[in-house]
Amino acid sequence: MKLPNFANNQTAQTLVVLLLVLSFLFAEWTTYLVAGQTNAILAQLFYLPVIFFSFRYAQRAVLCATVLAIIYLGGIFVTTGPQINELAPAIMQFYVYISIGIVVGALSSKIRDSEIKYRELFNQSADAVFLLNIKSMTIVEANQKFREIFGVSGGEEVSLNRIISDDNLVITLVHLLSDGKPVSDLDFSVSAGTSGSTDFVLNATSIDAYGLTLVTLADVSRIKREDAQSLAESEAKFRSLVELAQEGICSIDANGIATYVNPKLIEMLGYSEKELLGHSLFEHMGERTWVESPDHPDLSQPKAGVESEFEFIRKDGERILTNLSVTPITDRSGMVTGAMALVTDITEKKKGEAALRESEERFHTIFESQMTGALLIDATTHTILDLNEKAISLIGRPKEEVLGKVCHHFICPAESGACPVTDLGLVIDQSERILLNGKGERIPILKFVKAFTVSDRKYIIETFTDITERKKHEEELKASLEEKSVLLMEIHHRVKNNLQIISGLIRLQSRHINNRQAVEALQECENRVITMALVHESLYQSGNLAVINARQHFTHLGSNLLVSVEQDRPIKLATDIEEIQLDLNTAIPCSLIVNELVTNSMKYAFKGSKGGTITIGLHKEPSGMLRLSVADDGSGLPADFDVGKATSLGLKLVHRLVRDQLKGTIEIHRENGTEFVIQFSPIIPLPKKQVLKGS
Amino acid sequence: MTGKKILIVEDNAIVALELKERLSRIGYAIVGIAGTGHDAINLARKTEPDLILMDINLKGDMDGIMVAEQIGTFRKVPVIFITAYSNEETKNRAMKIAPAAYLVKPFKEQELYSSIEKALGVSI
């Protein structure tokens, strides 16, 4: 007969304990019997029912113990009679039984409560829980959930194989548990009852040394279904993103072969999906052209975050420039299983960049090569952003000293907050300023400032030109002009003086002549000379030196003539002259004409009358012609008088001057006296070259 | 007007001669004709004129205004400037010494006679 393995056999352990207790009791009882102490044996014997009933009826343990204690005490009394030496120990024993009853009852309640609690947990668990006997591979106890799932009745003994059909899994499970190792998160599926296939996660742990194992099965079917659905939805969403992406997307396997290409990549490269799948991106494209790629990405061993620029050749031969970004895909162990490639067509962007570079290059060349200094200034901060070589040269400081500094420290005298352009809204267009250069020299410049906005940022461009030479020439010209003005003034003055001398000589001569006619002739001659002298005087006084004020001149001339000719009757002078400027070539003949006509009027118009008025008039007509008139309210000329046929020198002179010099016409009006009207176009002086040629 | 002495300071001989004859005809005594500033000062000291007809633009280093100022230091005599210069600058300079008149050539004869009368306090 094979002995049980004592160390692992709970039953054997219990039997041994019981045997020892009984042995003790038997030995004790034998001792009492021999000693004639039958009451002691009875007292020992009553422990058994006290313990039993207190344990069994835990809620009434005190009552049971008390009843039994009373029975014992009653039995002793009946047996021994009212003997105090027998009753005293019995009374002590009475209290001991009650105490034992209380203790055992409490323990029993606790045990029962604990058992109820854990049984409740066991039965109410949402997972299927069962106790498995590894040795017999049978389920000795299972909770409600288990029975529901597997359709098992309460008392039915179920084999493990009925739960897990996979023999290999069963063997693995048993093996692990037999070694005392817990099993965690073991996935398996079963077909159980009417619920169809169900996914479980199994956890198992041994709870004693006799092969009893607590096993929990968590039903993860719903979770898996939900996960699968979420995954499907997520996959659909990302598929949609990938399909609609504006970048080319390609998934690559561990060997760098394309396993998926999105529509954009297909469109970008011009090949069909079939032509792209199963090939390396590069291999299929033919010649590889690495444009800018410090790292040539190995698509079978991609590195995360590597971006390179590639030129791809489309199926139609067109070349496109792309940005390729490759991200590796790894498994749980970290091994690269593939990669995701993102291809962005940057052809247009590159073209734009090239165009921008070209434009910038062009601008820069223009900026640098122009002969005027130019500054580009931030209109908000007034800092100098750029300046060209000419500006550096004019400012006289190194570029690095000027860049980033505020503009009004260099080329503008305005203080902060008082910028003429940005703060005061002025327009500076061809303005002359003074630039103080690095050497402290004051350089006259012509400045032009323009404010503009690019991409919502405000700028100012200032250009300036050194006008030192120009200023110098201007000064020289001004000095020359002043010198010429002085010279011209002096010439007029001397001409006038000389004419005065001639007039003086004539006057002297006339004083030595007795002939009245000769004296009158000389007087007329003198008046003509004085008339011409007056023109030069008027030119001298005008300040212009080229034209005279007609009103002032003819008024002076007229009043001079009135005193120069002897009168025996009062004659007044009147003028009706517009603000007209006459140059020398017009003023001389007009003055001589006025001299003759006024003199004639003074001599002949008022004979036999009490005097009268002579009026000198000069107007500009709408046609642009000038109208010179000398009128008197005297007796008038004979009706048949023709100035063209006049015999006197004076009128001959007038006729010639009008016709030949002024190229005008002369009319005589005879209403209310006599009016000579001369019409002519103002003589326009010829340019100096032609004048020199003529003379 | 008889006996009133007039000194003519004029560097142009013809103009000076003409003035002399014109004024002599109406009874003034022309005590001298000077063409330079220094001659004018000497003649003024010597002849003690009652009136000086002074041209402003003279030969030499002195103009008529300077001469008038110099003469004024030793003899109080009215001066009538006769000049071809009508610019303001010359006029302003001349007016600072308070002349009796400032006549710009060509001046009217009557204008000359009136100025002389006024300066000498006589009537022609």
Image (cartoon, rainbow, N blue to C red):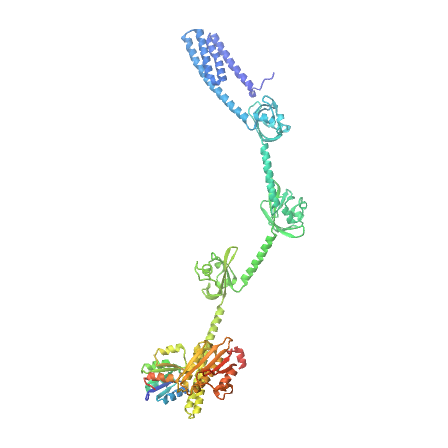
Answer left or right for A481 relative to A345.
left
Give above or below for A460 relative to A126: below
Give above or below for A425 relative to A253: below
Answer left or right for A2 relative to A381.
right
Give above or below for A463 relative to A226: below
Give above or below for A39 relative to A292: above
* Residue at the far bottom in the pictured view: A514
Residue at point 44%, 58% (across, down): A417
Answer left or right for A92 relative to A388.
left
Q: Nearer the viewer, residue A140 or A563?
A: A563
Q: Nearer the viewer, residue A468 or A22?
A: A468
Residue A119 visible here: yes
Location of residue A166 by image quarter: top right
In the image, residue A128 lies at what x, y percent?
57, 27
Q: Nearer the viewer, residue A465 or B98?
A: B98
In the image, residue A50 lies at what x, y percent?
48, 14
Quarter holding the N terminus of chain A? top right
Residue A546 visible here: no
Location of residue A97 by image quarter: top left
